Image: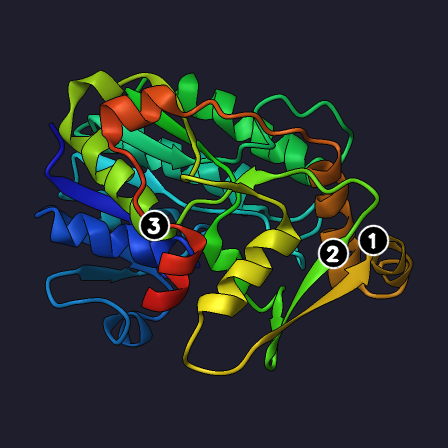
Amino acid sequence: MSKNICIIGATGMIGIPVTKELVKAGFNVTALVRNPEKAKSIFPAGVNFVNGDLDDKNSIGLALENADGLYINISTRPTDKENQFNPEAQGLDHIISAAKTNGNIKQIVLLSSFLARNYQGNWWVFNSKKSSIERVKKSGIPYTIFYPSNFMENLISEGMKRGNKLNFIKASVNHKSWWIAGEDFGRNVAQAFLTEKALNQEYPVQGPEALTMQEAAQKFVGAYSKERLSVGSMPYGVLKFLGYFIPQMKFVSKLMNVMINNFETFESQKTWDQLGRPQLTVEAFAHKT
């Protein structure tokens, strides 16, 4: 199976723990990054960096030069526009084209979304995310696609943590998610590159416990020891109203609308059986953060 892995999106919220787990598992890792010097301060020794971006086809080709496996961790940003360059549209097309030209890529592993698989709405962001699944499947290269639930890292992201407060969006319906830690997911990715069972497979990714956003925030705050935190909330209606004036809030409100209309059930037994059972609860994640 693959031993030399190229990572697209290594310095993102989930790219960081996945990259670290691939290094721990003994893979030779090359990452396409915009700022190699900054990336060197994040990762352990042994990760190779190629300076480039998704709109630069040549840099993607250089990053793939010695790779036989490819991990893609990209997403649309709140500042992206529908009719402009989009990482999950044109960016993904550039990656797939470079992988085909390379000729040595034996497996593409794509991080998608639990919400994207069966999306039926008209928001271009999720239509692009859903389309990326099919484009990887039709690439002609063996694939593994992951559909994660809510990542625990979201609890400490800029979107939720403001100062010493974790803020969640309070809606009339608050479904539970099976929260997963990036570290546990990284081990699943490593195992997917090690076993032929993962070729041309799709895996839901869920953690050990189903929690609402409020429950997850409260558990994290109760276990976190580096500073005193509290839990706050913003009504979904207020978020939606602010979205008329603040583009980033509009993006978040549309994302929340997708989440509110999704009822998550446990689907990850095959993932656990083939790629490993997740170990970290929200409290354990808080202790390690």
CB under 8 Å between discs 2 and 1: yes
CB under 8 Å between discs 3 and 1: no
Q: Is residue 262 left or right of residue 157?
A: right
- The first of marks 3 and 1 along the sequence is 1
Q: Is residue 27 left or right of residue 108?
A: left
Relative to 283, say whether 99 is above or below: above
> What residue does disc 2 label?
169
Comparing labels 3 and 1, the label whose residue is closer to the camera: 3
Relative to 60, say whether 149 is above or below: above
In the picture, the quarter occupied by the N terminus is top left
- The first of marks 2 and 3 along the sequence is 2
Residue type indicated by callout 3: Leu
Spot the residue most to the front.
222
- The first of marks 2 and 1 along the sequence is 2
Viewer-proximal residue among 9 and 229: 229
> What residue does disc 3 label?
280
- Locate residue 141: give its quadrant: top left
Relative to 187, say whether 225 is above or below: below
Q: Is residue 250 left or right of residue 108?
A: right
Q: Is residue 289 something one can see in this rendering?
A: no
Residue type indicated by callout 2: Ile
Residue type indicated by callout 1: Tyr
CA–CA distance in space, label 2 to label 1: 6 Å
**How many C-alpha atoms fall within 10 Å of the one at disc 1: few (<14), some, or many (≥20)?**
some
Look at the numbered disc 3 and give the secondary structure of its residue: loop
The residue located at (69%, 59%) in the rendering is 168
- Locate residue 68: give its quadrant: top left
Q: Is residue 104 something one can see in this rendering?
A: yes
CA–CA distance in space, label 3 to label 1: 29 Å
Task: Name the disc covering residue 236, or none.
Answer: 1
Viewer-proximal residue among 10 and 282: 282
